[in-house]
Each structure stands twice: as C-alpha cells, then as structure tokens.
Image (tube, grey):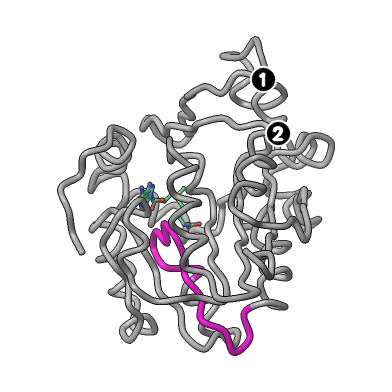
Amino acid sequence: MNRIIKRCDEREILSTYNKETVAYYHNFRRKGTFMNDYLIAPRLRTLLKSKIFGKDVLDLGCGFGKDVEWCLKNGAKSVMGIEINKDFISIARKNLSLSDVEIVNSSIYDAEKVNKKFDVIYSNMVFDQVQDLDLVFRKISSLLKKGGKIIFVAPHPLSTVTGDYSKFFDNYFVGRKVYHVPKSHNNRLPCYTRTFGDYSKLFYENNLCIEEIVEPKPSACSKKIFPAAYDIYTKLPSVVIFSLSKKENG
Ligand SMILES: C[S@@+](CC[C@H](N)C(=O)[O-])C[C@H]1O[C@@H](n2cnc3c(N)ncnc32)[C@H](O)[C@@H]1O
C-alpha cells in the first residue's frame, strides 16, 4: 500500500505534522478545549448517525481515530481509516478499542488501492489540506457503493474573506493556498481555499448530488469556554458540512 510520497502537498503535510506537533495536538485535544469539538462534532455526528448504522464506512485522514471509534460505537458495520502520517496512527492504535480496526497508512491520493466499496465515505477537515481534490474525488467516488454517501467537513468558503485567513485575501473567487497558524503553537497548516462554485463543479463532475449543506454554529455550552469565538461563529460561518449521495446512474 505504501508508495513514495511525490506530491508537494503530501510532503508538506508530513513535515508540518511532525512527531512533536502530533503529540502536542493529542494532549491538547484530550483537555477538551478544542473549539471544533463544540462547533463541528455535534451537527456532524447527528448527520452521521442517521447514515452509518449497519454500513461500511471509510474515514479519510482519520488522524487519532476519534471519529473511527465513534462510528464503531454508533452502529457502523465496519470502519476503515486512511491516514498519511504514522505518528497519528500509532496514537490511534494505542487506543484499545481501535485494535481491531484497519487503519491504512496511505495518502488519500491512493485511496482506490484499498480495493473495497463503502456505503459512507467521510472526512473531517482534511480536504482543505489537499491540492488536487478533482483527482481525489474521481478516486473516492469509484469506491462508493450504489446509493453511497460522501460526508465531509471543510473550512466555509466565506471564512476566507471573513475569518482568520481574510488578512491574506483580496479576492474570494481566486483559489489560493493560505496558512493557518494555530494560536496554541507555531506549526503552519496549509489550506487550499475553494468557493461554493468549485465544490458544485466537483460534485457535478463526479455524479454526486447534494443532500444537505450544514453551516454549524457552536453549541450553547461552549459560550463560557470560548466567549470570543462563540460570539464570532454564531454570526459568521467558520466551517461547512456537505452531505452528498452518488446518483443512481453514476
Ligand atoms: C486537521 S487533521 C483532522 C484529523 C481528523 N480527521 C479529525 O477530525 O480529528 C487533518 C488530517 O489529515 C491528514 N492528511 C492530510 N493530507 C492527507 C493525505 N493526502 N492523505 C491522508 N491523510 C492526510 C493529516 O495527516 C491529519 O491527520
């Protein structure tokens, strides 16, 4: 399954998430002070719950395997993860409840090599780190069973002009690579920006219909923990969740 990493976005992602950074993120997320747990997780999990019961699920860029574990505990028949970075995988494997789960150390550019079909393909905040999403979608839509779903979370297209990245931006319509530098520490996370028009073209070309677009707001309980972020994200979107289904004739 392993291959030599050739693409510059793959190389960059491996160097930015070095061993030290991965360990840092793991400790940080265990503290329960990660905004996305309050902004993304509640709506995403409601959406997933209705789709994964008794199904074969693939998590692209599964990181520490938190969502893999959640899908298994919530009725998925099987869950496979794909993750490019061995340091994320070794932490995921230490989690005993994941010992039986197949987590493949591969790039999602090679997803077709898993040689299995899935009912639900899912990805949480990964596609923005991928430069050639056309190629990835061509490959992953061929892994979907008839009537299969793709559910993914990405930075909201408008966040490029309203959010953290807006200082780099003068034109919403031009796709760019920008960097997010988390306040907690200094690694630079690349983000390839996309408009709603880019997504709609991608879905159309891969025979995918939009079932739902969710623009989540933070849950009320996060108001005390992150008052400033809560205030912003209840007024301006930060992320978007797309729920897609493969067309019957696709
Ligand atoms: C922001 S993290 C999200 C991790 C996980 N999905 C979650 O929600 O906790 C992005 C993850 O995508 C992985 N990733 C980025 N590019 C990838 C690629 N080309 N193939 C496989 N994994 C990739 C990174 O190594 C990292 O684990």
Taking the view exactly as shown, the residue that stands out farthest to the right is 235
Residue 3: image x %, image y %?
17, 53
Q: Quadrant of residue 13?
A: top left
Residue 200: image x %, image y %?
69, 42
Separation of marks 2 and 1 at Cα, in angstroms: 9 Å
Q: Amino acid at mark 2?
A: Gly
As drawn, 167 above or below 20: above
Element under disc 1: loop
Identify the residue at image location x=60%, y=84%. 74
Q: Quadrant of residue 70?
A: bottom right
Give the residue at mark 1: 173
Are the residues flagged by discs 2 and 1 in contact, CB closer than 8 Å? yes
Identify the residue at image location x=47%, y=70%. 58
Give the residue at mark 2: 197
Neighbor class of circle 2 (other Cα within 10 Å; few <14, some 14-19, many 20+) is few
Q: Is residue 44 left or right of residue 193?
A: right
- Residue 31 marker: none
Q: Amino acid at mark 1?
A: Phe
